[in-house]
Image (cartoon, rainbow, N blue to C red):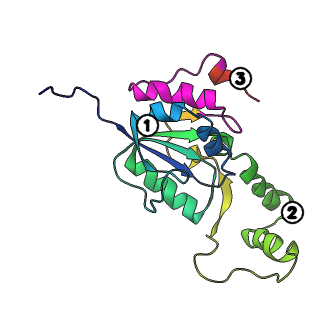
Amino acid sequence: MTMSTQTPKLRFATVWLAGCSGCHMSFLDLDEWLFELAKHVDVVFSPVASDIKQFPENVDVCLVEGAVANADNLELALQLRQRSRLVVSFGDCAVTGNVPALRNLWSEVDGGSRQSVLDRGYLELADTGAQHPHAPGIVPELLERVRPLHEVIAVDLYLPGCPPSAERIRAAIEPLLKGEMPAMEGTAMLKFG
């Protein structure tokens, strides 16, 4: 009988906060390389690859898409930081706030509040049946400002792009599989658009 010398699989997670899911779609654009990745990771949490509701303990690598815009985002961000060894700010919304942070302009320019944002979306722009969803838990409480991930938790690696290309995602993940941090150099990591 031979003993296996195979390295244990990394516990891998992806999270989707306030964003459009484009980063996750780009992740799926890894196509056949996803089969190679599956040899090295166990996906323990992901909105596109699992139906797990609670973020697990002892995650090795977590890719976080999206800005922190509401109470649910904040709670999950704090939880995943506590439970993950390495957190990757995944895409421009996580890195800078990007499109979700445009809500901040509503407050700064028009003196709008969180309530005025909800009024605009649910009442003023509604086609029919304008009303706020009243049941608790339907719409999480909006934070005063939308924030990039690093303003809320410590981030270990920034992976910019809107969305990051599959090539950039792979160039970041491959070194992580070897226990190394990716170098932010070369075409895959520096070319945008």
- Separation of residues labelled 3 and 2 (CA atoms): 36 Å
The picture quadrant where one finds residue 54 is: bottom left
**N-terminal-most mark, 1 or 2:** 1
Residue 110's label in the rendered image is 2
Which residue position holds label 1?
38
Which residue position holds label 3?
191
Verify whether residue 133 appears in magenta. no
**N-terminal-most mark, 3 or 2:** 2
Q: Are marks 3 and 2 in contact (CB under 8 Å)?
A: no
Verify whether residue 170 appears in magenta. yes
Placement of the C terminus among the 4 image quadrants: top right
Left/right of residue 48 with respect to residue 125 in the rendered view: left
- Above or below, comparing residue 146 to residue 166 in the picture: below
Q: Which amino acid, mark 1?
A: Ala
Secondary structure of the residue carrying tag 1 is helix
Residue 181 seen by the camera: no
Residue shown at the point (79%, 74%) measured from the top left: 122
Residue 191: percent from left, percent from top: 71, 23
Residue shown at the point (69%, 51%) measured from the top left: 20
Secondary structure of the residue carrying tag 3 is loop
Residue 33: percent from left, percent from top: 53, 30
Residue 101's label in the rendered image is none
Which one is in front, 53 or 115? 53
Q: Nearer the viewer, mark 3 or mark 2?
A: 3
- Above or below, comparing residue 140 to residue 186 in the picture: below
Q: Which amino acid, mark 3?
A: Lys
Secondary structure of the residue carrying tag 2 is helix
- Separation of residues labelled 1 and 3 (CA atoms): 27 Å
Residue shown at the point (72%, 53%) measured from the top left: 100
Q: Which amino acid, mark 2?
A: Asp
Q: Which residues are magenta?
A: 159-187
Placement of the N terminus among the 4 image quadrants: top left
